[in-house]
Image (tube, helix red, strand yellow):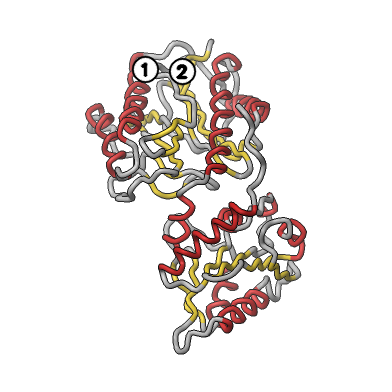
Amino acid sequence: MDQPSRGFSASEIKQRWHNLQTSMRTNNLDALMLTTEPDVRYVSGYLTPFWQSPTRTWTVILPAIGDPIAVIATIGEPLMSTTPIQNIVTYSSPDPADDASKTLIAVLNQLAGDVKKGSEKFRLGVPMGPETTLRMPIGTWHTLQKKCNEIEFVDATHVVQKNQRIKSVQEVAIIRYVAQCASRTFQQIPSVLKAGMSEIDVFKTFKQLALKEGVDDVAFLVGGAERDGYRDIIGPPTERPLAEGDVLILDTGCTRDGYYCDFDRNFSVGTPSKRVMQAHHVAWDATEAGLNIIKPGVTCKDVFNAMQSVMQPHASENTGGDVGRLGHGLGMQLTETPSFTAEDDCVIEAGMVMTLEPGYCYGDGQVMVHEENVLITNTGYELLSIRAPRDIPSIPL
């Protein structure tokens, strides 16, 4: 598979500005203030691991009319200047007495002053809703609200999330590539693992294989193994060795250019029991039910119900059948909106990249989770991950 080109063209980044600005004007917003790594990168292409340092506050302000303004620490100016954003205001950091607040306040007040609105306040949109965060000290946020008297801070969650849900051709190419790399890695697992290996060694092996296959990073890897089925899949690996009768799950979010794939695979150590094989069949069949219905125009609730209808008849009173959402959006974050839940009425559109992730509860708190990644096309879907076999693969003893 050909590797997608690195980075994004200036024209694609500027198209994102245009799309957001159109939505902003529709929603009576004068500007957006973006503070998180995915949101800042979405409007700039600014890719750096320096976000792992919590010392600096990074902000991009996108007016409803005009070019964006980056308000960042001086150390970030050389890299930001290589992006389409050319209006860059810097501040010295760390500065315990300020932490960017004075600089940011000055920029915001100047922008609000340039947009004369009579008695109306300047409406600054900030993502505030579910699955958003504000990446700045709470004290800085309070200071902004206090010192920017002519600015009304309003929730812009819908504006940002709705635009980010629809992926461009280049974004899809990146996710497709990393999903294929992870799929090839999973396909190698039965031939490289064996009983007696510790969970820690299993994780190390997966990461090494994935990097060789072409991913930039294995940013997310969780899982574990228990006899007859697992109960916890988000804990770190342990020294526990794989043993006959175990069910192993590995759930990965590998990245390429900062975009994620997100799916898992299950394995039986030795020959699987009938109970384990059946559980895998149920989870796989639930995924198939979701694939059979997913297309533009259906709702997330519709897809949830299709998958849940396969699992629910097999659930007993002591196992339950409700494991929360059964998939979600995917992109620059491991999980994005919308979600496949019984309440989500979001209408699926072409260009969305999503995960189908049914979790079938069985036995004493045991669960079999199955996940695939798909692109929503004009007529249905394209599978981005390589489809798992219906029969659970076996790791030799």
* Quarter of the rendering containing residue 340: top left
For the point 58% across and 73% down, the residue is 139
Say whether marks 2 and 1 touch (CB < 8 Å).
yes
Query: To which residue does mark 2 refer?
Result: 268
Secondary structure beneath disc 1?
helix
Depicted 336 relative to depicted 384: above or below: below
- The quarter of the picture where residue 14 lies is bottom right
Residue 277 drawn at (x, y percent) = 37, 17
The structure residue drawn at horizontal position 31% and vertical position 49%, both measured from the top left corner, is: 344
Observer able to see residue 249: no
Answer few, some or many: residues within 10 Å of disc 1's Cα (few below 14, many 20 plus, some between 14 and 19). Answer: some
x, y (%) of residue 304? 30, 39
Query: Where 217 falls versus 80 (above or below)?
Result: above
Kind of residue sitting beneath label 2: Ser
Residue, x 51% and y 29% (percent of image)?
Answer: 250
Q: Earlier in the sequence, mark 2 or mark 1?
A: 2
| Relative to 84, residue 142 above or below | below
In the image: residue 131, left or right of residue 279? right
Q: Looking at the picture, which amino acid does disc 1 mark?
A: Met
